[in-house]
Image (cartoon, rainbow, N blue to C red):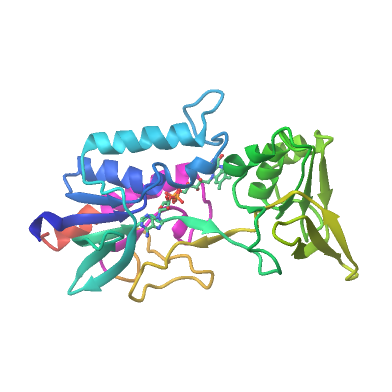
Amino acid sequence: MTENLFDLMIVGTGPAGLTASIYAQRLGLKTVVFGDVPGGNCYMIEQLMNYPGFIGGTTGVQWGVAAFAQAQGEGGTFPMTRLVKLSHREGQFVGLDVNSQEYVSNAALLACGVVPRTLEVPNIDKEGVFFCSLCDGPLFRGKDATLAVIGGGNMAAQETLSLSNFAKKVIIVYRGDRLKAEAVIQKAIDAKDNIEVLLKCKVVALSGEDRIDGIVVSDEAGTEKVIPVHGVFMAVGWVPNVDLIEFFVETVPEGYIKTNEKLMTSVPGLFAAGDVRDTDIRQVITACADGARAATYVLEFLQGRDR
Ligand SMILES: Cc1cc2nc3c(=O)[nH]c(=O)nc-3n(C[C@H](O)[C@H](O)[C@H](O)COP(=O)(O)OP(=O)(O)OC[C@H]3O[C@@H](n4cnc5c(N)ncnc54)[C@H](O)[C@@H]3O)c2cc1C
């Protein structure tokens, strides 16, 4: 049992979890880090923007793999599995992984990020619905495909731009009266002649038998029409990854975890960092900053408890 007793259990190998792990090691904490994707959601970033130090940029995959190697190089235990359950017993945290192996710690850090939200419309579970242009966009290379992106924020706009490189046409459908993308991204969209922006419309269903062959859109007057497409990419927001938590932790109504100024949650010894936290900016750099701060405050917490 003692070999599975840690100072800190980190859930997530994204920017927040990996940075926390690097700091925790250097602070002398015995740490275990769960997660099976080096770099977390960075694998979806085609070109990592807004992160200092990379003139001309880098890909999310390159960044994630390097950060993972750096974290492993500092030490700590990386079982490369996911946690199925996190419970809280007598002031300690108990994680159960997919191999039914138990791990116990005196503090825990939720750095488990978010998963894409989906639309509750007919046929959403059919083949041809995707959540990541970088992962699945290349399927349509050279296929003369028309693709739809649903959503109107930065992510939807970025997905649209990325897909426009290999689709014949990309239609971005948004219920608002203008896209909510950064000015630079909006400008890039305007400059592409194979992108159509369909505003003030919502997607009410997907059509197709075995596979999606169209989207059904409804305008403000409620008039519906079917637009034929070969694939649909969802970009309608995110849901925090909190299903594993078996005990009460305070969240905001959208499910993001509330923390205090030291990133501790409503449960003593349980911290949260990165996208899963109730925060205003969800980027790699802010997740890393959260990870660094959380590990530091974990040490303060454990020292206060005399470990
Ligand atoms: C398409 C796209 C483009 C983006 N572009 C940029 C950009 O250009 N610049 C930028 O700064 N940011 C960008 N972002 C945002 C950035 O990816 C996130 O803000 C960042 O990855 C958040 O880091 P995180 O560590 O909080 O969470 P994540 O990166 O989401 O990592 C969390 C990890 O925890 C794992 N996990 C969840 N539950 C469990 C469990 N039970 N057990 C074990 N592991 C678990 C998840 O699988 C995931 O691997 C982009 C995101 C997307 C989707």
Residue drawn at (51%, 29%) of the image: 58
Horizontally, residue 76 falls left or right of residue 283, namely left
Viewer-nearest residue: 91 or 305? 91
Quadrant in which residue 223 is drawn: bottom right
Q: Position of residue 228 (x, y in %)?
A: 83, 53
Count every numbered label the image shows and give the total: 0
Q: Which residue is nearer to you in this view: 208 or 31?
A: 208
Question: Toward the viewer: 294 or 222?
Answer: 222
* Residue 296 is inside the magenta segment: yes
Please state the horizontal and vertical placement of residue 18, each as a whole percent of the image.
Answer: 34, 44
What residue range appears in magenta?
Answer: 268-297
Residue at image point 77% right, 57% down: 174
Image quarter of the C terminus: bottom left
Say above or below: 100 vs 55.
below
16 w.r.t. 268: above or below: above
Quadrant of res 106: bottom left
The residue positioned farthest toward the top in the image shown: 55
Percent position of residue 33, x then y? 28, 50
How far from the left and from the top, in percent, is residue 305? 14, 63
In the image, farthest residue toward the left: 2
Q: Would you identify the image quadrant in which residue 112 lies? A: bottom left
Q: Is residue 161 left or right of residue 108?
A: right
> Which quadrant is the N terminus positioned in?
bottom left
Q: Is residue 196 magenta?
A: no
Front residue of this view, candidates 231 and 201: 231
Task: Classify residue 297 as left or right of residue 212.
Answer: left
